[in-house]
Image (cartoon, rainbow, N blue to C red):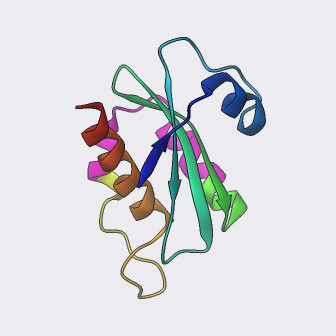
Amino acid sequence: MVKISTSIQHAAQYFFPRAVKQGMKHYSYDTFGTCSARIEFDIEDGRVHNVVFLGGCNGNLQGIGRLVEGMAVNDVIDKLEGISCQGGPTSCPDQLSRALREASAQQG
């Protein structure tokens, strides 16, 4: 389940070197079936920002975070959904797509 941080500024200071702008919502998603344990990200005006994976393949996951920066939520979901890792049912990119789908549903 995606959790909305009650203290956006506190979460941003802990996880991100840059400040979260007013109106940006911070989310935390506990992953399953992957090496990463959690994904932290922000959504503002339907766009993805500040994606950080905790655990997992650091270089590759930093790359994913940078590649999706500023992309529309639905575009990221479409590109990453269904990717598997090492023959498993999911992957870190797939988990990000699931997290974004849940966050979008919560936003209404």
Coordinates of residue 39 in the picture (x, y in percent): 56, 52
Where is residue 57, by image quadrant?
Answer: bottom right
In this view, the residue farthest toward the top is 22
Magenta span has 73?
Answer: yes
In this view, the residue farthest toward the bottom is 87
Residue nearer the viewer, 9 or 69: 9
Where is residue 1, by image quadrant?
Answer: bottom left
Overall secondary structure of the magenta section:
helix
Coordinates of residue 76 in the picture (x, y in percent): 35, 45
Horizontal side of 53 relative to 100 (left or right) equals right
Residue in the picture at 70% in, 58% down: 59
Magenta span has 44?
Answer: no
Placement of 9 over or under 108, stated as above or below: above
Coordinates of residue 79 in the picture (x, y in percent): 32, 52
Placement of 75 over or under 8, stated as above or below: below
Question: Which residues are drawn in magenta?
Answer: 62-78
